[in-house]
Amino acid sequence: MRLIYMKKWIGRYLIAIGVFHALLTFVFFQDGLIAIFQEGIWNTVSGHEDRAAAFWFMMSGFFSIVLGIFVNWAEHEYSKLPVSLGYSLLILAVVIVIVLPASGGWLLFPPGIALVIRNRKDK
């Protein structure tokens, strides 16, 4: 039973990445976030690179949380996840690391590799 439980970590891992990413927005993009909220949020990003960076950095964290929630549910509901999800995470990780090596893109390799390996073991 413990082995089965240990295999179902990918969703929680993606949620943790998303939470960490969203929280880092307040560290790295504090000025952009403050400007967005001071102007009342509505249509305050266009034409401001610092605000756009803050917005998309936070949204990518929230997207990772949403993806993680779904993957966590799917890991517990189904016996295996599609290998295409693993390859998609790996492709995303490679693109992010190529474009921005000093980023958290490296954190997408473990779940991508785990999904591919898990699917190969299940065959």
Image (tube, grey):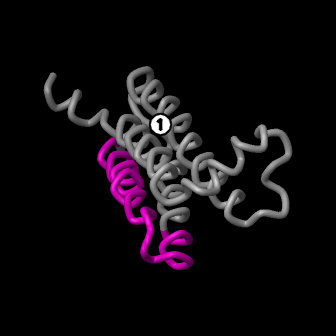
Q: In this view, does 51 lie above or below 85?
A: below
Quadrant where the C terminus is found in the figure: top left
Question: Which of 18 and 70 lies nearest the eye of the viewer?
Answer: 18
Question: Which of 10 and 116 lies nearest the eye of the viewer?
Answer: 10
Residue 70 rendering spot, x and y as whole percentages: 52, 30
The residue that appears at 16% across and 32% down in the rendered structure is: 3
Amino acid, disc 1: Gly
Question: Which of 32 and 92 lies nearest the eye of the viewer?
Answer: 32
Residue denoted by label 1: 68
Residue 115 in the magenta stretch? The answer is: yes
Residue 43 rendering spot, x and y as whole percentages: 85, 45
For residue 78, which quarter of the picture? top left
Task: Please give left or right for residue 49 compared with residue 24 in the image.
Answer: right
For residue 107, which quarter of the picture? bottom left
**In the rendered picture of this protein, how many numbered marks are placed on residues?**
1
Residue located farthest toward the front when viewing the structure as drawn? 38
The residue that appears at 71% across and 43% down in the rendered structure is: 38
Quadrant where the N terminus is found in the figure: top left
What are the residue bounds of the magenta stretch? 94-122
The residue that appears at 59% across and 57% down in the rendered structure is: 31
Task: Please give left or right for residue 9 compared with residue 5 in the image.
Answer: right
Residue 9 rendering spot, x and y as whole percentages: 31, 37
Report the magenta stretch's main SS: helix
Q: What element carries label 1?
A: helix
For label 1, the crowd category at 10 Å Cα-Cα, with few meaning under 14, some 14 to 19 and many 20 or more, is many
